[in-house]
Image (tube, helix red, strand yellow):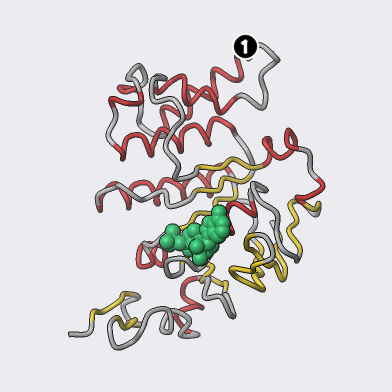
Amino acid sequence: MEVKGLNIGYGKKIVCPNISFSVDKGECTAIVGINGVGKSTLLRTVGNLQSSLGGILHIDGKSVREMKPHQLAKKISLVLTEPVASKNMTVQELVALGRQPYTNWIGSLSTVDKKKIVDAIEVLELKELKNYKCFELSDGQLQRVMVARALAQDTDIILLDEPTTHLDLFHKVQILKLLKSIAHQTKKTILFTSHEIEMAIQICDKILILDGVENPFDEPCKLIENKSFESLFPSETVQFDGTTGTFRIQK
Ligand SMILES: Nc1ncnc2c1ncn2[C@@H]1O[C@H](COP(=O)(O)OP(=O)(O)OP(=O)(O)O)[C@@H](O)[C@H]1O
């Protein structure tokens, strides 16, 4: 995926200008930044749920704008923060929805579809919950189901909006490590928004820091070297410590 000089926003209002980055197959990338800077807007723009306000957005050398919805559904899966439409579905049924771009008009599942569903349920450790209705799950369990649905969709690119919300520390680390291992092992491109900057520094291959001006993008250690995290928050409140890669609260 290649993004060059992308402006994102609503109507004529640019929320964040001049975003440039490129991600390869097998890379796990986090988009971080303060509240309201445009992380979710960027993810929705990249997923073609809304139009960009200028700039280049290419996948495999092709403009996303020119791709048909069914082509895009086989390229990109999206895990958004909105609640699931029908929590009355079982875990298995919801994961099976990921196969929709591939099924015929009555939605019957082929052997390949069924295998992708079983595999996704297994990878996200949902086997014991597969017959539970979604309303019976905790927020964290439901989050895992949504990732499983994206995995079943088996696209080259998976976009996730704040996949760690609602999760405790252990499950946050678990899901981010899982995303990274999925990216590395299956050569998928994974791009997610997060407020877990310290975890992203430790786990991700690349980070895009949306600051609304320069929007630096690089490997975490290079961003630390360039002091890119230091101006993210007001320094009288929170300071970044480059030696440990963590934020310190100023007392
Ligand atoms: N549907 C919309 N119409 C107009 N403006 C919007 C819309 N959705 C979001 N915005 C504005 O766009 C800006 C970026 O919002 P966005 O949700 O992308 O930020 P974010 O970085 O994901 O924030 P957070 O960390 O709080 O989730 C905000 O100023 C917000 O008010």
Q: Is residue 39 visible?
A: no
Picture quarter containing residue 237?
bottom left
Residue beneath label 1, please? 108
The amino acid on which the numbered mark 1 sits, given as a three-letter code, is Ser
Is 145 drawn above or below residue 2 in the view shown? above
- Image quarter in which the C terminus is found: bottom left
Can you name the residue that lies furthest to the left here?
Answer: 251
x then y, percent, for residue 218: 56, 72
x then y, percent, for residue 176: 40, 51
Which residue is more in the foreground, 54 or 166? Answer: 54
Q: Please give the name of the residue rendered at 38% of the width and 39% of the height, measured from the top-left corner.
A: 143
Is 78 drawn above or below residue 218 in the view shown? above
Q: Please give the name of the residue rendered at 59% of the width and 80% of the height, measured from the top-left corner.
A: 214
Can you name the residue that lies furthest to the bottom here?
Answer: 236
Q: Secondary structure at mark 1?
A: loop
The image shows a total of numbered marks equal to 1
Q: Is residue 113 visible?
A: yes
Query: Position of 94 compared to 190: left or right?
Result: left
Which residue is more in the foreground, 51 or 26? Answer: 51
